[in-house]
Image (tube, helix red, strand yellow):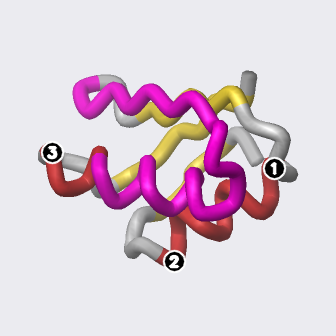
Amino acid sequence: MLTLQVEGMSCGHCVRAVTEAIRTLDPKAEVQVDLAAGTVRAETAAAPRAVAAAVEEEGYKVLSGA
């Protein structure tokens, strides 16, 4: 399980954007976004750095976890 601390997520659109970005790398990924805590948890076969890069490409800042 990969856990990322992510800055800038605030709404349902953010949840969808992050989830879809990760699932582009791994369509079977299980993704959980906690807006209040600013975390993204992903059960994925994708490399942690690739997941972080995909989240950052959506416009969010990964603070830790990759």
Mark 1 / mark 2, whichever is N-terminal: 1
Q: Nearer the viewer, residue 20 or 61?
A: 20
Q: Is residue 30 magenta?
A: yes
Place residue 32 in its image quadrant. Answer: top left
Q: Position of residue 25 (x, y in %)?
A: 69, 60
> Dot 3, crowdedness within 10 Å: few (<14), some or many (≥20)?
few
- What stretch of residues is rendered in magenta? 16-36
The quarter of the image holding the N terminus is: top right
Side (left or right) of 29 relative to 34: right
Tally of numbered tags: 3
Residue furthest front in the image: 28
Q: Which residue is mark 1?
A: 46
Q: Nearer the viewer, residue 27 or 1?
A: 27
Side (left or right) of 30 relative to 52: left
Q: Nearer the viewer, residue 22 or 4?
A: 22
Q: Which residue is mark 3?
A: 12
Q: Which residue is mark 2?
A: 57
Q: Residue at x 26, y 33 (%)?
A: 35
Q: Secondary structure at mark 3?
A: helix
> Dot 1, crowdedness within 10 Å: few (<14), some or many (≥20)?
some
Q: Is residue 28 magenta?
A: yes
Q: Position of residue 24 (x, y in %)?
A: 59, 63
Q: Does residue 2 lie above or below 8 as drawn?
A: above
Q: Residue at x 57, y 52 (%)?
A: 23
Q: Position of residue 11 (x, y in %)?
A: 13, 46
Q: Secondary structure at mark 1?
A: loop
Side (left or right) of 25 relative to 34: right
Q: Label 2 amino acid?
A: Glu
Task: Choose mark 1 or mark 2, whichever is in front.
Answer: 1
